[in-house]
């Protein structure tokens, strides 16, 4: 097998066995000769590397040394907005309705992306009801750097900031819309994020001021919609999805939470909130169903204890669900057009 034949063979291999993305699609092979191949993947999937190396050896022979690196690029955002130098990609995790487990999902996805090899931040955009301090077991006002920017707390390898760090736990944020919008912008722009591949924004429910501020003032790479199978939740989730479409923010996919409950005593499985709703929504809008998460006590208890599932039990079946969804989100971002604005910087003469 000559070098070109070897390249053609490797280009057809999928990065993950159960995913359609191939090495050729993302131009992952950076160098290749008879003894060594260098692969540079554009998305976070560290848990898939060993299997990929095994399949390369099975296809091309075990004598081929394989080196896999990851390079996550910044991708295009809404017209008129610029990508922050220290934040490559902003991903909004949203739901039209409260009570669907969006914050717990957002936190676990942030932890999962970090576990897959990305540098990740988490911004709590729910000004009225911040959840991140509890979910990550964090407290205390952030310190300021020399530029008077807030230094984010770090927990489980994820950088985090929230209005909950700046106000008393029991104090209500009795603010009108403009103040809420300003608070979100300040949290985003005045936090000293450090070289983030992804910033996950945990959105409040609804399609109000925060959502409009996000879509008009903050450079967003894509959005993820969290829903339950319940018709009422899906009704509002569809509105949230349409809002992102109208504001030209790509919807990366749908996560169906609380999809199935397994009885701890008898093992009986039951779709308490119904079934098939997210599948129908996915088909109606042509948007990927990223995954389905169980209605499980371990998710709730881990979140309440400030050590979410992916951190508390990273090899559990539930954590593997989050990791799979995180890889799919990262891959979906990788397929979006790249941000090339840095290549067209105009310097004064």
Image (tube, rainbow, N blue to C red):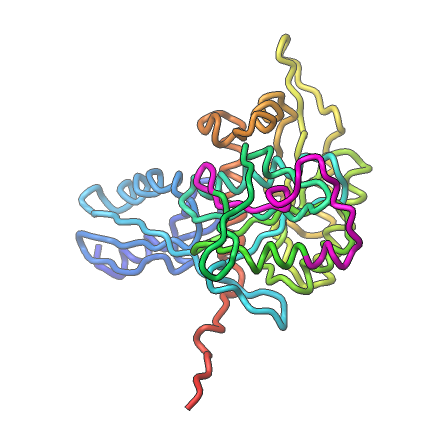
* 255 versus 30 height, above or below: above
Residue at the spot x=63%, y=42% of the render?
Answer: 164
Q: Is residue 339 left or right of residue 78?
A: left
> Where, quadrant-wise, is the N terminus in this rendering?
bottom left
In the rendering, at what x and y percent does residue 237 appear? 75, 45
- Above or below residue 66? Residue 320 is above
Look at the picture and state if 205 lies above or below 84.
above
Q: In which quarter of the image is residue 277?
A: top right
Q: Which of 303 and 154 is in front in this view?
A: 154
Where does the C terminus fall, quadrant-wise? Answer: bottom left
Residue 246: % across, % down: 74, 62
Along the viewing direction, whichever of 67 and 119 lies nearer the viewer: 119
Q: Does the magenta stretch include residue 116?
A: no
Residue shown at 53% from the left, 45% from the top:
160
Q: Where is residue 210 in the image (x, y as percent from the top left)?
A: 72, 54
Q: Which residue lies furthest to the bottom in this view?
A: 349
Residue 117: x percent and y percent? 40, 45
Q: Write the start and end of the magenta stretch as one range.
A: 154-182
- Residue at (58% x, 22% y) in the render: 298
Query: Is residue 174 in view from this perspective?
Result: yes
Q: Residue at x 52, y 46 (%)?
A: 142
Viewer-proximal residue, 121 or 340? 121
Tally the marks.
0
Residue in front for this viewpoint, 42 or 268: 42
Residue 160 is one of the magenta-drawn residues: yes
In this view of the protein, can residue 282 be seen by the observer?
A: no
């Amino acid at each position: 097998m000559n070098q070109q034949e070897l390249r053609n063979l490797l280009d057809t291999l999928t990065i993950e066995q159960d995913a359609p993305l191939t090495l050729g699609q993302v131009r992952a092979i950076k160098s290749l000769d008879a003894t060594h191949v260098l692969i540079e993947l554009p998305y976070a999937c560290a848990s898939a590397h060993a299997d990929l190396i095994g399949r390369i050896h099975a296809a091309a022979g075990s004598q081929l040394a394989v080196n896999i690196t990851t390079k996550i690029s910044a991708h295009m955002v809404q017209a008129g907005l610029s990508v922050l130098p220290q934040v490559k990609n902003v991903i909004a995790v949203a739901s039209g309705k409260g009570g669907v487990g969006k914050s717990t999902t957002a936190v676990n996805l942030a932890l999962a992306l970090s576990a897959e090899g990305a540098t990740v931040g988490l911004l709590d955009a729910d000004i009225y009801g911040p959840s991140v301090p509890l979910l990550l077991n964090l407290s205390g006002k952030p310190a300021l750097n020399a530029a008077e920017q807030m230094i984010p707390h770090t927990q489980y390898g994820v950088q985090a900031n929230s209005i909950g760090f700046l106000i008393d736990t029991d104090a209500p944020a009795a603010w009108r819309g403009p103040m809420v919008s300003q608070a979100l912008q300040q949290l985003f722009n005045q936090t000293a994020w450090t070289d983030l591949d992804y910033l996950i924004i945990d959105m409040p429910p609804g399609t109000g001021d925060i959502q409009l501020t996000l879509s008009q003032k903050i450079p967003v790479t894509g959005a993820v919609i969290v829903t339950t199978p319940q018709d009422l939740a899906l009704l509002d989730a569809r509105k949230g999805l349409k809002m992102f479409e109208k504001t030209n923010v790509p919807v990366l996919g749908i996560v169906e939470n609380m999809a199935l409950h397994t009885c701890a005593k008898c093992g009986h499985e039951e779709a308490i909130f119904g079934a098939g709703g997210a599948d129908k929504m996915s088909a109606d809008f042509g948007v990927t169903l990223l995954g389905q998460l169980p209605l499980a006590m371990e998710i709730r208890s881990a979140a309440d204890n400030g050590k979410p599932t992916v951190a508390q039990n990273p090899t559990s079946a539930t954590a593997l669900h989050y990791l799979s969804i995180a890889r799919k989100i990262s891959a979906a971002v990788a397929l979006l057009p790249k941000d090339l604005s840095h290549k067209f910087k105009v310097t004064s003469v």
